[in-house]
Amino acid sequence: MLKINFVDFWPDFVKDNNYFFHLLNTKYNCVIDEEDPDLLFFSVDYQRTNERARYKNHRCKKIFFTGENCRPNLSGTSEATDRGYHTGRCDFAFTFDFIDEPRHYRLPLWVLQIDWFNKIGYKNPQFVLPQDQINNNKYISTPKTKFCTTVFNNPVSMRGEMYNKLSMYKSIDGYGRPFGNWFYGEDKKYEILANYKFSICFENSVAPNGGYYTEKLFHAKTGGTIPIYWTDEKCSLDFNTKSFLNLNDYNTMDSLVADIISIDNDQDRYEEMFNEPLFVDGKIPDFALPESVLGFFEEKILC
């Protein structure tokens, strides 16, 4: 039996229905124990409840996970703040970061968008895509009757600038709080994306070491669009860069817009990029596979 607990995660996080619970449950008999856990998972304290403070002197191994653009606090003070996020001191960490640290495992947020354990969803995320549908699903095969969309709640300047520049060519349909039509659910997002040739899916920032890749590119590509993305050049270590457009590969945003227009008017170029798989040779990188992540737990954390 393995006693675990989760604190300071995002709203609607379910302690016994999430990626880490089901991953560990493939090998161990996991139970939620809020009083005396063996492992305590915590995140950036989205709701500022600071539940992890209860375990400051507890024997449990403290494991930090974040999908946000902030660094793990593996050797600093008991509490720290990075980019506005609260990062408590941890013994081990799972983040997107490329760092040389034996107590850290690189696990970017896009990995958690895959239904590795046949659970359909975790409430938040409400829907996760089955592994066998990454390269071929109903969203990809839906006829593309519209030009471009974008889905976001955080109106960072780069997203707005891209939206405005490309809108000068053709109208773009926006979804999310800035557009007054926010909705809940990844399945709804997929239903929207399926109708469009392109989607703007910029990250909200780029990490100092690279590697900050959330759900945005994964949703855009597996939802049937050609993603218009913004991130660092290390994304080639995770993804097939022939399958999407990355602002980082262009000298200016205007040159990216010009290339989008060219692809929109060249069916052969469009189909070539559309048919490229998200991952090189259609194969998910080894580090993202559940057995690799479980191996880190067994070799480093549970040894």
Image (cartoon, rainbow, N blue to C red):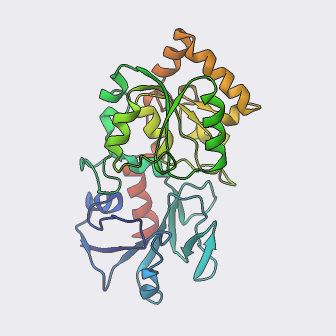
Q: Position of residue 179 (x, y in %)?
A: 49, 45
Q: Is residue 63 left or right of residue 137?
A: right
Q: Position of residue 263 (x, y in %)?
A: 58, 17
The quadrant of the rendering that contains the N terminus is bottom left
Tell me if I can see residue 137 in this picture: no
Tell me if I can see residue 145 in this picture: yes
Tell which residue pokes out farthest to the front in this image. Answer: 180
Q: Say which of 252 and 26 sits in front.
A: 252
Q: Say which of 76 and 49 sits in front.
A: 49
For residue 163, above or below residue 36: above
Specify the quadrant of the image occupied by residue 20. bottom left
Q: Is residue 114 left or right of residue 241?
A: left
Q: Is residue 289 left or right of residue 148?
A: left
The quadrant of the rendering that contains the C terminus is bottom left
Q: Position of residue 294 (x, y in %)?
A: 38, 57
Tell which residue pokes out farthest to the right in this image. Answer: 251
Q: Position of residue 113 (x, y in %)?
A: 39, 47
Q: Say which of 18 and 172 sits in front.
A: 172
Tell which residue pokes out farthest to the bottom in this image. Answer: 57
How many marks can you see?
Answer: 0
For residue 229, above or below residue 39: above
Q: Is residue 48 left or right of residue 117?
A: right
Q: Say which of 248 and 293 sits in front.
A: 248
Q: Residue at x 59, y 56 (%)?
A: 97
Specify the quadrant of the image occupied by residue 26. bottom left
For residue 122, above or below residue 269: below
Q: Residue at x 55, y 29 (%)?
A: 244
For residue 188, above or below residue 67: above
